[in-house]
Amino acid sequence: MLHLLGVITVKDNADDDFEMTVVCHRPEGLDKLEAQTNFNKRELQVLYRGFKNECPSGAVNEDTFKQIYSQFFPHGDKWTDKCYASTYAHYLFNAFDTGHTGSIKFEDFVTALSILLRGSVTEKLQWTFNLYDINRDGYINKEEMMDIVRAIYDMMGKFTYPVLKTDAPKQHVDAFFQKMDKNRDGVVTLDEFILSCQEDENIMRSLQLFENVI
Amino acid sequence: MAAGVATWLPFARAAAVGWLPLAKKTMPKPPVDNSSRSDEILYVNVSGVRFQTWKNTLDRYPDTLLGSSEKEFFFNEETQEYFFDRDPEMFRHILNFYRTGKLHYPRYECIQAFDEELAFYGIVPEIIGDCCMEEYRDRKKENQERLAEDSEANEGTDAPLPPDSTSRERLWRAFENPHTSTMALVFYYVTGFFIAVSVIANVVETVPCRPPKGSVKDLPCGEKYQLAFFCMDTACVLIFTFEYLMRLFAAPSRCKFMRSVMSVIDVVAIMPYYIGLVMPENEDVSGAFVTLRVFRVFRIFKFSRHSQGLRILGYTLKSCASELGFLLFSLTMAIIIFATVMFYAEKGTKGSTFTSIPASFWYTIVTMTTLGYGDMVPNTIAGKIFGSICSLSGVLVIALPVPVIVSNFSRIYHQNQRADKMRAQQKVRLARIRMAKKGTTNAFLQYKEDRGLGDRDSDSTALCVKNRSAFEHQHHHLLHCLEKTTNHEFTDEGTYSELCMTDSVGFRTSRSTSLSSHQGAQNNSTGCCPRRARRRAAIRLANSTVSVSRGSVQELDTLHLKTTSIPAQTRSSLNAQGVNLKLNCGEQDFSAAIISIPTPPANTPDESLPPSPVPIPGILRNTRATTFTHETVKISSL
């Protein structure tokens, strides 16, 4: 009996697995999304059409995400077959995938875009903090920052001017911590981060740049 | 760029916010986007079938017609849609390319039509998706091969030679295409006959004849009737040598000719005879001489000039060279393996015929090709087992490349059949097309008549004029302008060839005869040389320099004109002959050839004044006639 059940369940699992890959994910209604984000209906429609075209199944997994993001930056090393932008894309993916499901659905996509393009300064900075805080513990420490900065420098590819020195990321991180870490405890908290950024006029100004992307 | 990139760019730009706190320098200003960002539905009307799509979809590929501003040229303000006068079925595939990013090739469509559509919409065929790429490539290659063959067949052979070709060219032509002239045909058959005679003689001279008196031994006929055979051989070789030398003389490129296969065969066929003549009657050398005689059998290959089937077989073998090579290689491998095995299997047996591995080669070959002579037979059990494996594998190895060779042969054979059929039908096709085309040129000449008529009688002009469309009016006006520009007139082949002849012979006399045949009493010999009947010489239109609508391009290309030698001096005579002309127009053939006749400077042809003395159009010099090289107008636009 149990054996039979076992057999049946095993079969069901296999079927389920198969179905999971085929079943599309449908986003919540347009009205709900409009309420949750700062986009109007038309913009949501445009966004969804593009999204659906690229991912008919309704969700982006990490590999596809990396591939898409890599298209915008110099291509990777031919020999190791590694894209330069893949590390940063990995961090981005985690930032988008707020529910840690392993795939970005349209809601996640639109929510993040809404913050980045239409959100308030605080929201944007908060999102950025989340991006930098790789382990989501509320603090950015030097190692996390090193990873992020190295990933960003990697995106530049091999051929840069002036030639990229190996300690450039370290210097960059040190400068960053100098600025952000107010109480010199070796980590940056969200409040420190927001405060420091608000003090920097350059950052404030550039935050406004990306508002009309869509 | 992939389709997706355009869609994801906004997202990538948004993600750049993540870099801002780290930035060492200030960010650059973003580009200002003035175009309306709102997405809208575009209506595309393709020959009545309305397609609708988002503007963004089309914008994905900005280097195509639909993605760029080029489509604005097709925008219809009244209906607010883009109108394309093209095939809606094909457009479906094109639009799907924008939507899905993959271009598919529909198998039921003609490859050329598809290519044309792609070219129109600015899409490079290389982006056809992998699923359809192979099919597309195959069909394209097939089509190109077919077209190349057809054009070769067209160019060949049956067009008449230009009159100014040298005797050398004519000779070459006669050799390559025996059915162009009777002499060539006769020569063709004679050589064929002699090849057969030579081959039969070679065969017969080895047959044993009755021994001559006083001898018991049977002699081969070759030795009994030595003189007779020698004479026959000499005659054949003389003919072959003569033929080879003539071909060598006539060949347009002697080096190429000498390297060609047929010429090599010719040489090999006749060399043994000459070598035999030169060689002394030496015992040692005569052995080699006997070997040389074997080469005489190559004469049989000369038949391939006479037989198309042989040529096809030759092509097949050449095109299957790789398969044959593979067959040979695999057979060699198998032979060596099995010979070795058989040798060692049969080694111990007493009186075994497998004395060495090379000796076993013979057994292996005979077994693998399933001949089985039985002169070498394995006696041990192991030998028999391996022998059976050998024969089974032989069947397989030989059977494998054969279908490839067969299919190649079948393809080439069918191609040849097609080429022959097309050649045969070509003449009929051309004739029928020419007849259909006569209408337009008829119309023009008719128009010219009518204009002449019209000068006198406006009513009839009006009638005639009404029957022509606006297009025809403009077309005729255009031709008229050309006539005025070049100071020459359109005419037809008949008159032109007359002009050629009369130029060489003497202008006046033949003309007068021709004229008198046409018209009645009126003759134009009203004076000395300046007065001549104006001839409308055939004028060749500059190829498609006239930009008219597409339909008319065809007509222009095939503008064959009739030449009618009309006595130019009086329009009245023209009128009288108006009817005749029309009839003539209907029957005569057109040749689009322009002859530029040098007009005497003082005289200008003036058609509109009928009775005024018509200046002499100038004599068609013989030289000019000869420089007029017949680029025989092919009806290319059909």
Image (tube, rainbow, N blue to C red):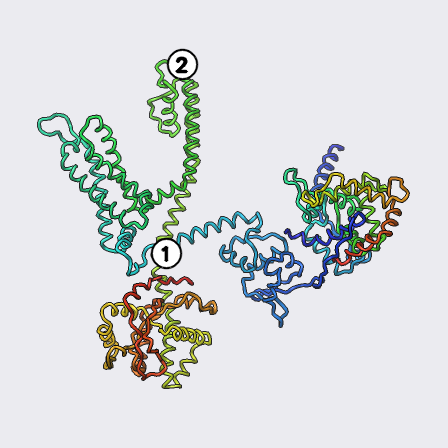
Say what amino acid the circle numbered 2 marks: Gly
Measured Cα–Cα span from mark 1 to mark 2: 69 Å
Mark 1 element type: helix
**In terms of depth relative to the viewer, which is nearer, B617 or B156?**
B617
Image coordinates for residue B402, horizontal then vertical, percent: 41, 37
Instruction: State the image coordinates of residue A116 (x, y, percent, origin top left).
Output: 79, 53
The part of the image, by quadrant, that contains residue B276 is top left
Say what secondary structure mark 2 lies in.
loop
B221 up-or-down from B181: above or below: above
Q: In terms of depth relative to the viewer, which is nearer, B357 or B14?
A: B14
In the rendered structure, the answer to whether residue B61 lies left or right of residue B548 reads right
Chain letter belonging to callout 2: B
The amino acid type found where label 1 is placed reads Asn
Position of residue A170 in the picture relative to residue B342 (left or right): right
Q: Are marks 1 and 2 in contact (CB under 8 Å)?
A: no
Q: Does the rendering let one see residue B587?
A: yes
> Which x, y percent locates residue B560?
36, 68
Residue B7 x %, y %? 69, 54
Nearest to the eye among marks 1 and 2: give it: 1
Q: Identify the residue position indicated by label 2 in the image.
A: B348
Residue at (37% x, 49% y) in the render: B416
Tell me the quarter of the image containing the C terminus of chain A. Answer: bottom right
Q: Give the tally of numbered discs.
A: 2
Residue that mark 1 sits on: B154
Confirm whether residue A20 shows in the render.
no
Quadrant position of residue A121:
bottom right
Quadrant of the rendering where the N terminus of chain A is positioned: top right
Q: Of residues B108 and B163, which is closer to you in this image?
A: B163
Point out the tag, 1 or 2, that comes first from the N-terminus.
1
Q: How many other residues sit within 10 Å of disc 2, few (<14), some (14-19) or many (≥20)?
A: few
| Both labels 1 and 2 in a single chain | yes
Residue at image location 85% in from the left, 46% down from the top = A179
